[in-house]
Amino acid sequence: MSISNQNDRDHLHHVVIIGGGFGGLYAAQKLGKAPVKVTLIDRRNFHLFQPLLYQVATGSLSPADIASPLRSVLAKNKNTSVVMGEVVDIDAKAQVVKLKNNLAINYDSLIVATGVSHHYFGNDQWSEQAPGLKTIEDAINMRRRILSAFEAAEKTHDSQFKESLMNFVVIGGGPTGVELAGTLAELAHRTLSDEFTNIDTRKARIILLEGANRVLPPYHEDLSEAAKQSLEKLGVEVRTSAMVTNIENHVVTFKCGEEVEQINAQTILWAAGVKASAMGKVLGDRVGAELDRVGRVIVQPDMSIANHPNIYVIGDLANYPHQGERPLPGTAAVAMQQGEYMAHLIEAKVKQREADKFYYQDFGSLAVIGRHEAVADFKFLRLKGWLAWFIWTFVHIYYLIEFDNKLVVMIQWGWNYFTHRRSARLITGRYLQVLEEMEGIKAGGLAVETREPAQVV
């Protein structure tokens, strides 16, 4: 870049975006040709396609299949810089964001899109035994726990411990929980069914616990019932109106009405709730942003924070209460549209034009349960079964960010479809430590047949 071009860029309206998820990335992409300077800050150097994260956790896809380097995605945007770092504070008066290692970046407009994390409803100690699914590391950890349980069950002679290893509990019957339980059932009852010698993986129990009276509560009742039937056909035990009260020593305690039940399971997976990222509290403390009960920022109709018209919050971190009786859901579709809206809004402001308030176009919801099993709610049309599954497949491939991801995922899904195999079933990390941490493993708990070497005469 020439000196004159650099000076021109330095005088442009500077838009700083915190977070490279759907909202932040879509805003950065759409601002690529706007007369502004853009800086995207993220703790990671990649964008993660979270809707397919459960497929990494169950060995269907590899992490790289659903991740795209941010610099690669934004390479054609000559007005955009990418900074890998973590924002820890905001000075609204000086219009500065502060990163770790004392790095500071000035802004004219600030877009915060840092998403949400797991919410254990005041029981954060459960996270050690019931990990959630929000990051690549979460997915790899889940995959390690799931596959390690089968490996340990193959070797143990303790029948009680083996039963615990073959129990898998998924807590939360929303889209993530339903998709995770269904794929886990396919993995255990079909993919692994002929790969072990001492266990029959088809006898594995996959139990889905949901506190509401039906799975997929936001969907129409007919689709919720269809999803439940599809899960049960796959072998998932669906328990609704089941409120988890404790998770301790690999035992899940829950109440169904007045009845208290317990399940002993070495693998417990959390998909029950989310809470705002730490940036929600920072905005509450520093600029007086109003927060809801889970820490999301309540925004104005143009996604800005009250009394701070140049600070915007989008995506899962935003509580947008200006459309309908309930705030908009924390979905990828909402974040994408808000990101695109922010680009149009900021460009209009720079050009001193009026911009309309944000309005979300709801094109419907999709959730997959298993092979040929999915539900789709398009408001005017509700689908289930094969057609819904085909639409879900097409939509998810379409919205993957880079072409090579689309191609790889399409080929991998095709291979999985015809062979029932999952090639990404790798146990990585400290496998033995995972086994040692499982309740009940002790000296003599695991045993493998050994033989004396044959004598050669």
Image (tube, grey):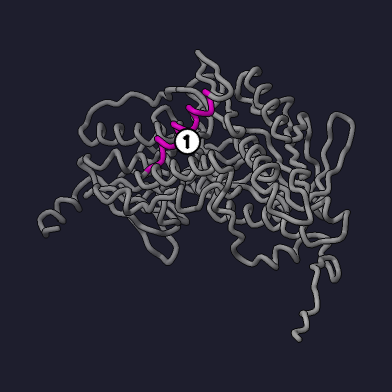
Q: Disc 1 marks which residue?
A: 332
Q: Specify the farthest residue to the bottom.
A: 457
Q: Nearer the viewer, residue 358 or 426?
A: 426
Residue drawn where x is 79% and y is 68% of the image: 448
Amino acid carrying mark 1 in the image:
Ala
Q: Position of residue 456 (x, y in %)?
A: 74, 84
In the image, taking residue 451 as reference, residue 97 lies left or right, namely: left
Question: Seen in the image, is 202 located left or right of residue 280?
Answer: right
Residue at the (72%, 30%) spot, across then down: 232
Residue at the limit of the structure toward the top, as seen here: 380
In the rendered view of the protein, which quadrant contains the C terminus?
bottom right
Residues 197 and 162: in front is 197
233 to the left or right of 161: left
Give the extent of the magenta segment.
Answer: 387-401
Could you tell me residue 267's position as x and y percent? 73, 51
* Residue drawn at 53 percent across, 30 percent down: 329
Residue 371 shows in the view: yes
Does 69 appear above or below 441?
Answer: above
